[in-house]
Image: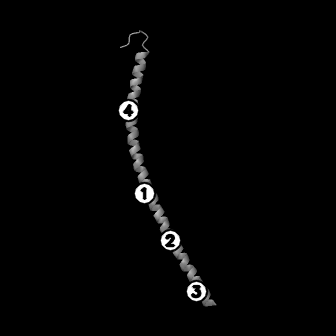
Amino acid sequence: MRSLAVAVGCLLLVGGVALVAIADQERLTALAAVKAEIVRVERALDDSRGQNLELAERLTELRAQVAQQDADLADTTGFLP
């Protein structure tokens, strides 16, 4: 009976070690996937920052044009250029 208990205990120990090893491997795989996703998102963010900067410059130009047109239309002398 004692040898059966030892055998069952060893099987449980080996099974536990196997489960821990598998769980650790899955954790490492998930961690690698998350790191790859972070790199992808950072690249996309850098690209969007560049696009946002270009759009902000264009918006500034358009606002300046609108302000100039508003000033022209607000001319109270009645003489438009």
How far apart are the alpha carbons under marks 1 and 3? Answer: 43 Å
Q: Amino acid at mark 2?
A: Ile
Q: Amino acid at mark 4?
A: Arg
Tell me if residue 10 comes above or below residue 23 in the rendering: below
Point out the tag, 4 or 1, that comes first from the N-terminus.
1
Tag 1: residue type? Ala
The residue that label 1 is drawn on is 36
Contact flag, marks 3 and 2 (Cβ < 8 Å): no
Q: Which mark is residue 58?
A: 4
- Label whose residue precedes the other's in the sequence (3 or 2): 3
Q: Which mark is residue 7?
A: 3
Mark 2 Cα-neighbour bin, 10 Å: few <14, some 14–19, many ≥20: few
Q: Amino acid at mark 3?
A: Ala
Could you say whether the residue bearing mark 3 is in a helix, strand or loop? helix
Residue 64, image x, y percentages:
39, 25
Mark 4 or mark 3: whose residue is earlier in sequence? 3
Crowding around mark 3 (Cα neighbors within 10 Å: few <14, some 14 to 19, many 20+) is few
Q: Residue at x 39, y 38 (%)?
A: 53
Residue located at (52% from left, 75% from top): 18
